Amino acid sequence: MRAIRILSFALLLLALPAAAQTTFDWSMVGSTGIVPDPGAGHEFTGPSFKHSSFRTGTLRARYPVTNTYGSSSDDSPAWTTLWASYLDNSSSGSVTVKLFKVDDCSNTETLLCTITSSDDSSSQCSSCSFSSSDIDFANNSYYIEVAIARTTTAASEQLHVVGIQ
């Protein structure tokens, strides 16, 4: 009986890392973005980033990515996926999410991954992939830039959540 309990406990411990891999290591709700132009006509509603009701054009927000993986001695998490939850309910608008790497010494910026929305009447989740070798917090910094565009106030494009896994 004791051997069965020990075996059951060991199997549980082995299953925990697999279960943990289904969640995102880093994420932010849309409403926490840094908007370079405070008067651009944006609105933060609950977790979402969107246009204020009477504005059109393109809004941009940036999200600084921090190393939440492992310990402070692990500067290269095995991340390979950028993920976004958004609403793009009109052909008169779009949501674009980009992950950038910035070399800390040369300031060279590299685009790693882009998500471009598609029209749908309900919220969607989309992702794109990049190489895990591109993530190195010892030598680089990272940010996500979101652009929400619309040409008419009837379009209701918005970002809900961005994440990396």
Image (cartoon, rainbow, N blue to C red):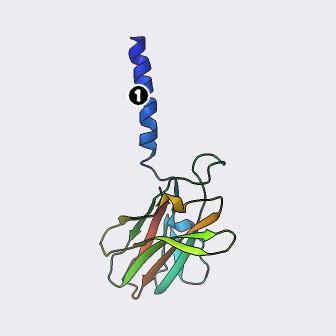
Residue named by callout 1: 11
Q: Is residue 104 visible?
A: yes
User: The residue tagged with tag 1: helix, strand or loop?
Assistant: helix
- Quarter of the image for residue 92 reads bottom left
Is 108 left, or right, of 54 in this rendering? right
Amino acid carrying mark 1 in the image: Leu
Residue at 56 percent across and 84 percent down: it is 40
Q: Quadrant of the N terminus?
A: top left
Is 86 left, or right, of 44 in this rendering? left
Residue at 44 percent across and 46 percent down: it is 21
Question: Badge 1, how many Cα within 10 Å: few under 14, some, many 20+?
Answer: few
Residue at 41 percent across and 21 percent down: it is 7
Residue at 33 percent across and 74 percent down: it is 118
- Quarter of the image for residue 125 reads bottom left
Residue 15 is situated, as x and y percent measured from the top left of the image, at 41, 35
Residue 122 is situated, as x and y percent measured from the top left of the image, at 32, 68
Q: Which is nearer the eye, 49 or 107? A: 107
Residue 8 is situated, as x and y percent measured from the top left of the image, at 40, 23
Q: Is residue 55 visible?
A: no
